[in-house]
Image: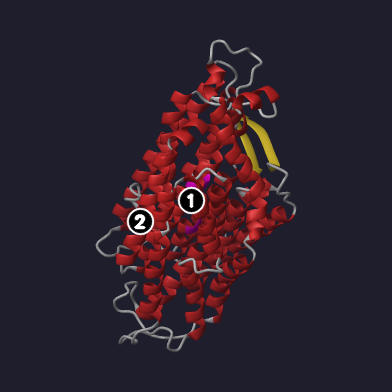
Amino acid sequence: MLNSILWTPLIFGLVAMLVPKRLAPWAAGTGAVITLALAVAVLVGFDPDGGMQYVVDTDWIPGLGISYSLGIDGISIFLVLLTALAWIPAIAFTALRGVERPGLFFLMLAAGETATLGAFLAQDLILFVLFFDLMIVPFYFLFGIWGSDRDGVTVQSATLKMIIFTLIGSLLMLVAAIAAGVIAADGGPLTFSIAELTEKGLPNGSQNWIFWFFAAAFLVKMPAFPLHGWMPDSYRAAPLPALAVFSAVLSKVGAYGFLRVVLPIMPDATELFQTAMLVIALGSIIYGSFMAFTRFDLRLILGFSSVAQLGFITAGIFALNESGSEGAVLQMVNHGLVVVPAFLIVALIAERTGSEELGPMGGLAKRAPVFAVIFLIVTMATLAIPASANFIGEFFILNGIWQTDIAIAIIASSGVVWAAFYALRMYQRTMHDPLPEGADSREISLLDALVVVPMVLCVVVLAFSPQLIIHSSEPAVAENVEKVFDEAGAGSTAAYASTAEPDESPHGTGDPGHEEGSE
């Protein structure tokens, strides 16, 4: 089942490349719909208490201990579902307006979906790094070929900056991944299985630098302050449908990497650098919120809003408790569901006003009440109004931070206030105020509504049933958090102590002697 989910988009992307141009969108769209159907089928058969499920484990490069290993649990299942869902409106929106060289465009979009799904499904560290690095390749071409120069920013400079930032982070992560496998082997058989690396553990000194190598890659991808330097130019230059899925899903792979790789494999370093990561998260919240409030470009308002939201998610993860991590998982899904229709609405606004700047906008709600209501729902979700799923996610996160550090929780809560300012300002300046000369206030078309409304409905439904995600992720999140404190408390360097017996397990679970010693 996971193989089918993973490779279906790429297969249909290749078909889109080979068929006549007019059939390319249909081929890509069919692949995306089938992928979503498979993801829903996995969700229906998913057992929240079943641990890692639908596992695929095959030796890939046995001599190097690398395996083709896939699996899905409560942390990743809804991110896989989000990925499968987000690509459909991006494909449909592009198909309705047409695009040059459609076969290549949809192939790159499909390749991006496969690489992203691979990162969420991979259970081998090298396989995870491979998919993590491959994600950026199709978007480099999507931004570079179909992007446009805006506000003095050229496509060439924007894509070059993006690739340099992400490439440096990816190289650091590759070095760290190889080092983790070699050090954990300690002269024995080499393996890069995430589960086995978690069980074997790493010595404290190695954990510290490996932690920061992984953190650099993940923080660049999110992006987080101050490693976000590539984001403003790339967001200006990118084609909006590709930018919608890029912002909604690819940024979550960085946050997911902390939960999947860093916390279980480097528990001592996670605990040691907890405060440092919370400060970085706090910086992202404050800086992203402030910049979103001061910008007039709709793309950058949403872009810096995403920096702030990823700051909340990072803070939830490094609260190192169940409330924070559950809120982080919920908020990753919430943000993805909101960002896709938000960027598509920006494209619709630009079609009506000829601009993406707040200055020449206003009054678009005058003859478009349905369009205004759709945008209002997205705006309310962005500012995390009470009763929205975003509010519940942020509440879980702030509650988790409060249990860890009250001062950071109080400062982080200011991001909620800032969100109300920049979100309401964005809505007011586009939908209300006088209608400027040359702007066209017209209702959303039926076809555009069929693209945008389903995502908005998902936002509304999740507001009424966030427990669907919380309940399914709770066992996996609890296990992940417990690993940090159990393994850090046990002292992972015990595995390397010269007095240790060959059959002793410093990270053993269920060993009464070990538990008593930890306590």
Q: Can you tell which mark lies on residue 286? A: 2
In the rendered image, residue 261, in percent from the top left (x then y), is placed at: 53, 38
Please tell me whether mark 2 sits on a helix, a strand or a loop: helix
The residue pinned by badge 1 equals 402
Quarter where residue 193 is shown:
top right
Q: Is residue 252 magenta?
A: yes
Instruction: Identify the residue at image location x=62%, y=23%.
Output: 517
Q: Amino acid at mark 2?
A: Ile
Q: Amino acid at mark 1?
A: Trp
Up/down of 446 relative to 487, above or below: below
Q: Position of residue 113 (x, y in %)?
A: 54, 53
Q: Which residues are magenta?
A: 248-256
Residue 2 in view, yes or no: yes
Q: Is residue 436 above or below residue 170?
A: below
Report the quarter where the C terminus lies. top right
Number of marks in the image? 2
Left or right of 55? Residue 82 is: left
Asked whether the viewer can see residue 223, the reply is: no
- Per the model, the C-alpha gap separating discs 2 and 1 is 17 Å
User: Which circle's residue, 2 or 1, is located before the other in the chain?
Assistant: 2
Near-viewer residue (159 or 324): 324
Q: Secondary structure at mark 1?
A: helix
Q: At 36% from the left edge and 68% from the top edge, which residue is drawn? A: 298
Q: What is the chief secondary structure element of the magenta stretch?
A: helix
Kindly identify the residue that appears in the image at 68 percent across and 41 percent down. Answer: 52
